[in-house]
Amino acid sequence: MRQARQIANALHTMVPAKRAGRTRCRAALLTWLICLASLAPAVAGEKTPTDPTPSMDRLGWLTGHWRGEAGGIVMEEWWTAPGGQLLLGLHRDSKPAKEGAAPPKGFFEYLRIEGGANGIHYLASPMGREPTPFKLVRLDGEKQVAVFENPGHDYPQRIVYERQGDALVARIETIEGTKRRQWQYRRVGDFSK
């Protein structure tokens, strides 16, 4: 609002005294239009051009050691605190060996979320393979939800992380929301410091 007043004052000083009546009305109208235009992104709930990429700090709620279990498989994820436009993660699935049997081979995945000129991307490297990028398309720091997508990937095409109190829910699916798989983790450690 202060900026609008400054514009109005500048317009008033440029108007010659003889034509002040009509021109000042036009200047006042122009000032109000500028004010309304500057408020439009805020009213629409859109980001302003000065903040094209959300801060990596808004993903800090992922930080920690998370553990869950499903079908006898222990699933764990570790996420570092954001730093230098980067969060590092590791996922591991392990299953206890049955008595007298060799231990089953586990599954692991290197994870990272990195910010750059093209936005924020989640990169997954299952079993150490070449990373597959997923672009951040939605981040709600208040509700602690992050949605990453890669429509060109076969499956998954969407990865969702959502913090629900002391639980972390991870979900993968297609862009249409089909083939949905979901896992729930509990926080068992914190290394945010």
Image (tube, grey):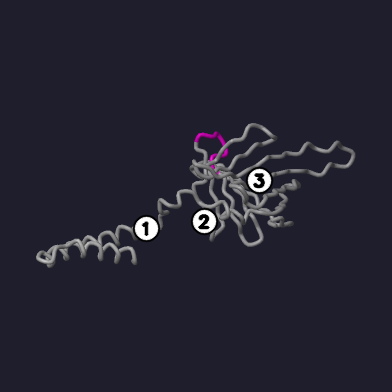
List the residue tagged with mark 3: 88
Residue 19 lies in quadrant: bottom left
Mark 1 is surrounded, within 10 Å at the Cα level, by few (under 14), some (14 to 19) or many (20 or more) other residues, namely: few
The C terminus lies in quadrant:
bottom right
Residue 155 within the segment the image draws in magenta: yes
Name the dominant secondary structure of the magenta segment. Answer: loop
x and y, in percent, of residue 86 in the image: 61, 46
Q: Residue at x 56, y 38 (%)?
A: 133
List the residue tagged with mark 1: 44
Judge whether residue 178 can be spotted in this image: no
Q: Nearer the viewer, mark 1 or mark 3?
A: 3
Q: Is residue 2 left or right of residue 14?
A: right
List the residue tagged with mark 2: 140
Q: Which residues are magenta?
A: 152-158
**In the structure shown, which secondary structural element does the residue marked by tag 3 occupy?**
strand
Give the amino acid at mark 3. Answer: Leu
Give the amino acid at mark 2. Answer: Asp
The answer to which of 61 and 104 lies nearer the viewer is 61
Tell me, yes or no, whether the two marked residues, 1 and 3, touch with CB atoms within 8 Å: no
Tell me, yes or no, whether the two marked residues, 1 and 2, touch with CB atoms within 8 Å: no
**In the structure shown, which secondary structural element does the residue marked by tag 1 occupy?**
helix
